[in-house]
């Protein structure tokens, strides 16, 4: 009975972090420009689609706020609890909130920027590895989804090789799974050779 109560109280405690993750940065930024981002381009609310449809500055603003959202969630969790497990679960909840926002009002994003904010707090070196891999793949292929997935896979791989704490490695693996799942349509397009290269509105 006690274990059930602990699990339920933990789940309830994670709800605010999930709700933080659902903050619709891209949707609001695009709306400021008179655009319903869910109805144009890929329909995704992330920085990539905002950049393509609205422009570079709007995309960059979306990116920065979404990264901050992830980092802020981790900082908030650290201020509320000193338990590593809860802090890591809070980070996963923030990413999940971004990826799976409450339907049908908004479609969630792919979670890459928010995940970067979470991972930067979990392990700065992991975040650096993610950025290096992302930039390496992106500059070569100019495909955001491919670069994002490669970076997502590199993070837990680095955690294992660098012998980071188990809770860090497990959290980064869970986040990688979330990101790969959200990119499942991109994976299909990559297999079929239909995934577009990155362009922005001038």
Image (tube, helix red, strand yellow):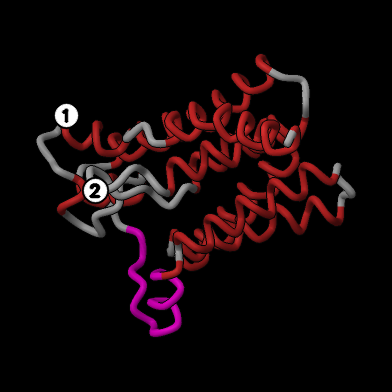
Q: Position of residue 76 (x, y in %)?
A: 59, 19
Q: Position of residue 69 (x, y in %)?
A: 48, 29
Residue toward you, 55 or 85: 85
Q: Residue furthest bottom?
A: 192
Disc 1 packing (10 Å; few <14; some 14–19; many ≥20): few
Query: Does 189 lie within the magenta span?
Result: yes
- Image quadrant in which you'd find residue 160: bottom right
**What mark, if any, has residue 181 been given in the picture?**
none
Residue 123 visible in this rendered orientation of the protein: no
- Image quadrant in which you'd find residue 144: bottom left
- Image quadrant in which you'd find residue 118: top right
Q: Are marks 2 and 1 in contact (CB under 8 Å)?
A: no
**Mark 2 = which residue?**
104
Residue toward you, 164 or 77: 77
Element assignment for label 2: loop
Disc 2 packing (10 Å; few <14; some 14–19; many ≥20): few
Residue toward you, 21 or 29: 21
User: At 54% across and 23% down in the image, what residue appears?
Assistant: 72
Looking at the image, residue 116 sits to the left or right of residue 200; the answer is right
User: At 30% across and 41% down in the image, what residue appears?
Assistant: 56
User: At 75% across and 37% down in the image, what residue appears?
Assistant: 3
Looking at the image, residue 15 sits to the left or right of residue 188; the answer is right
């Amino acid at each position: 009975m006690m274990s059930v109560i602990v699990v339920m109280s933990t789940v309830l405690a994670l709800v605010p972090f999930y709700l933080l993750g659902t903050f619709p940065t891209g949707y609001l930024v695009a709306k400021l420009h008179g655009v319903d981002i869910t109805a144009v381009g890929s329909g995704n609310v992330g920085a990539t689609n905002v950049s393509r449809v609205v422009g570079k500055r709007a995309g960059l603003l979306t990116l920065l706020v979404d990264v901050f959202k992830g980092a802020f969630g981790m900082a908030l969790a650290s201020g509320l609890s000193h338990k590593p497990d809860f802090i890591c679960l809070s980070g996963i909840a923030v990413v999940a909130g971004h990826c799976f926002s409450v339907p049908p009002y908004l479609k969630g994003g792919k979670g890459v920027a928010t995940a970067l904010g979470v991972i930067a707090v979990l392990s700065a070196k992991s975040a650096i590895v993610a950025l290096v891999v992302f930039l390496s793949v992106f500059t070569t292929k100019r495909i955001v989804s491919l670069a994002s997935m490669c970076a997502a896979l590199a993070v837990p791989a680095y955690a294992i090789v660098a012998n980071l704490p188990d809770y860090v490695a497990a959290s980064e693996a869970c986040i990688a799974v979330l990101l790969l799942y959200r990119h499942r349509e991109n994976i299909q397009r990559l297999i079929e050779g239909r995934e577009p290269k990155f362009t922005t509105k001038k």
